[in-house]
Image (cartoon, grey):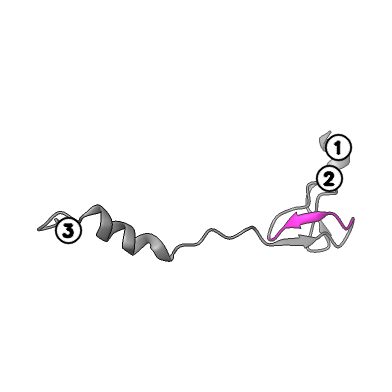
Amino acid sequence: MAHPKRKISKQRRDKRRTHYKAKPETLATCSNCNSTVRYHRVCSECGHYRGKLAIDKKTEA
């Protein structure tokens, strides 16, 4: 297992972590009901995913 020979200072550690930028989630519109949906997720309104019914919302409620 890796074992550091010297302590990494807070400044050096934080410099290494500066490249990460938080981005807002990518949103799309549902092809069935035109509501806003996150990419690669089932629509919470109608239960469709990529044009096909994934979850039957009528029997679930």
Q: Is residue 1 above or below residue 61?
A: below
Per the image, the residue denoted by label 2 is 56
Task: Look at the image and say whether residue 35 sits in the magenta stretch.
Answer: yes
Q: Amino acid at mark 1?
A: Thr
- Which SS class for mark 3? loop
Q: Amino acid at mark 3?
A: Ala
Per the image, the residue denoted by label 3 is 2
First in sequence: mark 3 vs mark 2: 3
Which residue corresponds to the image point at 14% horizontal and 57% vertical from the top-left?
4
Mark 3 vs mark 2: in front: 3
Residue range corresponding to the magenta coloring: 33-39
Residue found at the very far left of the displayed protein: 5
Task: Look at the image and say whether residue 14 sits in the magenta stretch.
Answer: no
Residue nearest the observer in this picture, 31 or 49: 31
Per the image, the residue denoted by label 1 is 59
Q: Quadrant of residue 39?
A: bottom right
- Which SS class for mark 2? loop
Query: At which x and y percent is residue 50?
Result: 78, 63
Q: Is residue 5 above or below residue 61?
A: below
